[in-house]
Amino acid sequence: VLLSRRSIAEGLAGEHRSRRRGSSPEFADFKSYSQGDDFRRIDWNIYSRLDELFVRLSEVTTELTVHILLDASNSMDWRSDLSLPTKFAYARRVAGSLCYVSLWHFDRIVIAPFGRELGPVFGPAQGRSHVMPMLTYLSALEPLGETDLATSLDRYVRARRRPGIMVLLSDLLSG
Protein backbone atom coordinates (compact mmCIF):
# COMPACT_ATOMS: atom_id res chain seq x y z
CA VAL A 1 0.00 0.00 0.00
CA LEU A 2 1.32 3.43 -0.93
CA LEU A 3 0.72 6.15 1.61
CA SER A 4 1.41 9.83 1.37
CA ARG A 5 3.06 11.37 4.44
CA ARG A 6 1.52 14.75 3.78
CA SER A 7 -2.14 15.53 3.44
CA ILE A 8 -3.31 17.07 0.23
CA ALA A 9 -5.31 20.21 0.86
CA GLU A 10 -7.04 20.36 -2.49
CA GLY A 11 -8.99 18.09 -4.79
CA LEU A 12 -12.28 16.30 -4.64
CA ALA A 13 -13.32 13.84 -1.99
CA GLY A 14 -11.49 10.54 -2.22
CA GLU A 15 -10.52 7.63 -0.02
CA HIS A 16 -7.42 8.98 1.73
CA ARG A 17 -7.74 10.21 5.30
CA SER A 18 -6.74 13.78 5.91
CA ARG A 19 -5.71 15.72 8.97
CA ARG A 20 -8.11 18.46 7.90
CA ARG A 21 -11.46 18.71 9.64
CA GLY A 22 -14.53 20.14 8.00
CA SER A 23 -18.04 19.37 6.91
CA SER A 24 -18.32 15.82 5.67
CA PRO A 25 -20.53 12.83 6.37
CA GLU A 26 -17.53 11.04 7.90
CA PHE A 27 -17.67 11.63 11.66
CA ALA A 28 -14.26 12.08 13.33
CA ASP A 29 -14.68 13.43 16.87
CA PHE A 30 -16.31 15.94 19.22
CA LYS A 31 -14.74 19.03 20.70
CA SER A 32 -15.98 21.55 23.23
CA TYR A 33 -17.64 24.54 21.66
CA SER A 34 -15.53 27.68 21.64
CA GLN A 35 -16.35 31.14 20.39
CA GLY A 36 -16.04 31.32 16.62
CA ASP A 37 -17.01 27.69 15.96
CA ASP A 38 -19.80 27.12 13.45
CA PHE A 39 -22.97 26.93 15.54
CA ARG A 40 -24.57 24.73 12.86
CA ARG A 41 -22.14 21.96 13.88
CA ILE A 42 -23.33 21.91 17.52
CA ASP A 43 -24.60 18.49 18.56
CA TRP A 44 -27.87 19.29 20.32
CA ASN A 45 -28.38 15.68 21.47
CA ILE A 46 -25.21 15.87 23.58
CA TYR A 47 -26.26 19.28 24.87
CA SER A 48 -29.58 17.83 26.07
CA ARG A 49 -27.75 15.04 27.92
CA LEU A 50 -24.71 16.86 29.33
CA ASP A 51 -25.84 20.52 29.47
CA GLU A 52 -22.62 21.46 27.65
CA LEU A 53 -22.04 22.50 24.05
CA PHE A 54 -19.99 20.22 21.79
CA VAL A 55 -19.23 20.57 18.09
CA ARG A 56 -19.15 17.56 15.77
CA LEU A 57 -15.91 17.28 13.80
CA SER A 58 -15.88 15.50 10.48
CA GLU A 59 -12.98 14.02 8.59
CA VAL A 60 -12.34 15.35 5.11
CA THR A 61 -11.10 12.77 2.64
CA THR A 62 -8.86 13.65 -0.27
CA GLU A 63 -7.66 12.13 -3.49
CA LEU A 64 -4.15 11.92 -4.84
CA THR A 65 -2.70 12.25 -8.30
CA VAL A 66 -0.18 9.50 -9.01
CA HIS A 67 2.29 10.30 -11.76
CA ILE A 68 4.12 7.30 -13.23
CA LEU A 69 7.17 8.30 -15.28
CA LEU A 70 8.20 5.23 -17.24
CA ASP A 71 11.63 5.00 -18.83
CA ALA A 72 10.87 3.75 -22.33
CA SER A 73 14.41 4.00 -23.67
CA ASN A 74 16.23 1.31 -25.63
CA SER A 75 18.30 0.44 -22.53
CA MET A 76 15.10 -0.82 -20.89
CA ASP A 77 14.67 -3.32 -23.75
CA TRP A 78 17.45 -5.49 -22.29
CA ARG A 79 17.20 -8.96 -20.75
CA SER A 80 19.84 -11.19 -19.21
CA ASP A 81 18.35 -14.35 -20.67
CA LEU A 82 16.08 -14.79 -23.70
CA SER A 83 13.63 -16.78 -21.55
CA LEU A 84 13.10 -13.79 -19.21
CA PRO A 85 11.07 -10.61 -19.81
CA THR A 86 12.90 -7.35 -20.54
CA LYS A 87 13.39 -4.60 -17.97
CA PHE A 88 10.79 -2.62 -19.94
CA ALA A 89 8.24 -5.44 -19.50
CA TYR A 90 8.90 -5.50 -15.75
CA ALA A 91 8.60 -1.70 -15.54
CA ARG A 92 5.26 -1.82 -17.39
CA ARG A 93 4.05 -4.51 -14.94
CA VAL A 94 5.05 -2.40 -11.93
CA ALA A 95 3.41 0.66 -13.49
CA GLY A 96 0.25 -1.33 -14.19
CA SER A 97 0.15 -2.62 -10.61
CA LEU A 98 0.60 0.83 -9.08
CA CYS A 99 -1.99 2.33 -11.40
CA TYR A 100 -4.47 -0.48 -10.71
CA VAL A 101 -4.27 0.13 -6.96
CA SER A 102 -4.56 3.90 -7.46
CA LEU A 103 -7.57 3.63 -9.79
CA TRP A 104 -9.24 1.16 -7.44
CA HIS A 105 -9.01 3.79 -4.67
CA PHE A 106 -10.41 6.49 -6.99
CA ASP A 107 -7.13 8.36 -7.25
CA ARG A 108 -6.14 10.11 -10.44
CA ILE A 109 -3.29 8.59 -12.49
CA VAL A 110 -1.01 9.89 -15.24
CA ILE A 111 1.45 7.63 -17.07
CA ALA A 112 4.21 9.37 -19.00
CA PRO A 113 6.73 7.26 -20.94
CA PHE A 114 9.95 9.02 -21.84
CA GLY A 115 13.10 8.55 -23.85
CA ARG A 116 14.84 11.63 -25.24
CA GLU A 117 11.36 13.21 -25.39
CA LEU A 118 8.12 12.49 -23.56
CA GLY A 119 5.96 9.90 -25.28
CA PRO A 120 2.16 9.88 -25.54
CA VAL A 121 0.76 10.40 -22.03
CA PHE A 122 -2.09 8.34 -20.58
CA GLY A 123 -4.42 10.30 -18.37
CA PRO A 124 -5.28 11.98 -16.20
CA ALA A 125 -7.69 9.13 -15.54
CA GLN A 126 -9.69 8.39 -12.44
CA GLY A 127 -11.94 5.56 -11.36
CA ARG A 128 -12.20 1.83 -11.79
CA SER A 129 -13.57 2.09 -15.32
CA HIS A 130 -10.12 3.17 -16.53
CA VAL A 131 -8.33 -0.04 -15.47
CA MET A 132 -8.71 -1.84 -18.82
CA PRO A 133 -7.81 1.21 -20.99
CA MET A 134 -4.72 1.75 -18.78
CA LEU A 135 -3.62 -1.88 -19.17
CA THR A 136 -4.22 -1.71 -22.93
CA TYR A 137 -2.14 1.46 -23.12
CA LEU A 138 0.75 -0.12 -21.18
CA SER A 139 0.63 -3.28 -23.31
CA ALA A 140 0.95 -1.25 -26.52
CA LEU A 141 3.95 0.84 -25.35
CA GLU A 142 7.17 0.42 -27.31
CA PRO A 143 10.70 1.65 -26.49
CA LEU A 144 11.29 5.27 -27.58
CA GLY A 145 15.04 5.38 -28.33
CA GLU A 146 17.76 7.10 -26.28
CA THR A 147 17.28 8.54 -22.79
CA ASP A 148 17.56 12.12 -21.63
CA LEU A 149 16.29 11.81 -18.06
CA ALA A 150 17.02 15.37 -16.90
CA THR A 151 15.32 17.06 -19.86
CA SER A 152 12.31 14.73 -19.77
CA LEU A 153 11.77 15.19 -16.03
CA ASP A 154 12.20 18.95 -16.28
CA ARG A 155 9.62 19.23 -19.07
CA TYR A 156 7.18 16.99 -17.26
CA VAL A 157 7.40 18.76 -13.91
CA ARG A 158 7.22 22.26 -15.41
CA ALA A 159 4.06 21.35 -17.32
CA ARG A 160 2.25 20.21 -14.15
CA ARG A 161 1.70 22.19 -11.00
CA ARG A 162 -0.70 19.93 -9.08
CA PRO A 163 0.75 18.07 -6.10
CA GLY A 164 0.74 14.32 -6.08
CA ILE A 165 2.88 11.23 -5.81
CA MET A 166 5.51 10.83 -8.50
CA VAL A 167 7.00 7.40 -9.24
CA LEU A 168 9.98 7.11 -11.58
CA LEU A 169 10.59 3.70 -13.14
CA SER A 170 14.01 3.80 -14.80
CA ASP A 171 17.13 1.71 -15.06
CA LEU A 172 19.23 4.88 -14.79
CA LEU A 173 18.54 5.02 -11.05
CA SER A 174 19.90 1.56 -10.32
CA GLY A 175 23.45 2.40 -11.29
Image (cartoon, helix red, strand yellow):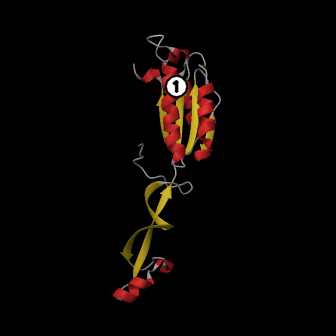
Above or below residue 11? Residue 35 is below
Which residue does the image show at 50% across and 29% down from the upper left? 93
Q: Position of residue 40 (x, y in %)?
A: 51, 79
Question: Which residue is most to the left?
Answer: 50
The front one of 146 and 80 is 80
- Quadrant in the picture for residue 132: top right
Which secondary structure lies at badge 1? helix
Decide: few, some or many residues near mark 1? Use Cα within 10 Å; few <14, some 14-19, many ≥20.
few
Which residue does the image show at 61% across and 21% down from the upper left? 142
Residue 58 in view (yes/no): yes
Above or below residue 61? Residue 96 is above
Mark 1 residue type: Ala
Q: Position of residue 111 (x, y in %)?
A: 57, 34
- Quadrant in the picture for residue 131: top right
Q: Position of residue 107 (x, y in %)?
A: 54, 47
Q: Quadrant of the C terminus?
A: top left
The front one of 144 and 27 is 27
Tally the marks: 1
Residue to which mark 1 is pinned: 150
Q: Quadrant of the N terminus?
A: top left
Which residue does the image show at 62% across and 45% down from the upper left? 129
Q: Position of residue 34 (x, y in %)?
A: 39, 79
